[in-house]
Amino acid sequence: AVTAQSVRRYVECAAAALEIVDSRIAGWDITLGDTIADNASSGLYALGDTVPADSLPNLSAVTMSMTENGEVVSNGVGAACLGSPWEALAWLAN
């Protein structure tokens, strides 16, 4: 089993990412089968610059704010990802 601690040795670098969710299904009247057929309703994504693993900050404490026309519309923190993005990566690996 991979743990949040052990999974770090397999990571060479990381990058901030933003996914834009979209669907071809009108009105989001969507089922699981539709989601699979629609490639998980993924529209677009953007990646930031890569950061070497040994230079990463405490990912649980990383915060983000998204704005629209200068107004904050969403906030987030790394700990909201299963307690730590490292936990999420270990879960995925297992």
Image (cartoon, rainbow, N blue to C red):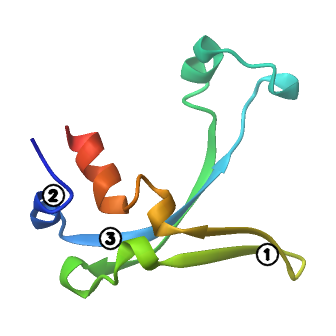
Locate residue 27, reporting x and y percent: 88, 27
Q: Residue at x 18, y 70 (%)?
A: 12
Query: Residue 67: which disc?
Result: 1
The 10 Å Cα crowd at callout 3, few under 14, some 14 to 19, many 20 or more, is some
Q: In this image, 71 relative to 36: left or right? A: right
Type of the residue with mark 3: Ala
Q: In this image, 29 relative to 76: left or right? A: right
Residue 68 is drawn in which quadrant? bottom right
* 57 in relation to 45, above or below: below
- N-term-proximal mark, 3 vs 2: 2
Compare residues 53 and 5 and report the one nearer the observer: 5
Q: Residue at x 28, y 43 (%)?
A: 91
Q: In this image, 73 relative to 1: left or right? A: right
The 10 Å Cα crowd at callout 2, few under 14, some 14 to 19, many 20 or more, is some
Locate residue 5, reporting x and y percent: 15, 63
Locate residue 4, reporting x and y percent: 21, 58
Query: Residue 14: which disc?
Result: 3
Tag 3–tag 2 contact (CB < 8 Å): no
Give the Cα separation between the discs numbered 3 and 2.
13 Å
Type of the residue with mark 2: Val
Compare residues 41 and 60 and report the one nearer the observer: 60
Residue 86 is drawn in which quadrant? bottom left
Residue 54 is drawn in which quadrant? bottom left
Type of the residue with mark 1: Thr
Query: Residue 50: which disc?
Result: none
Which residue, given by chain and number where applicable, does mark 2 sit on? 7
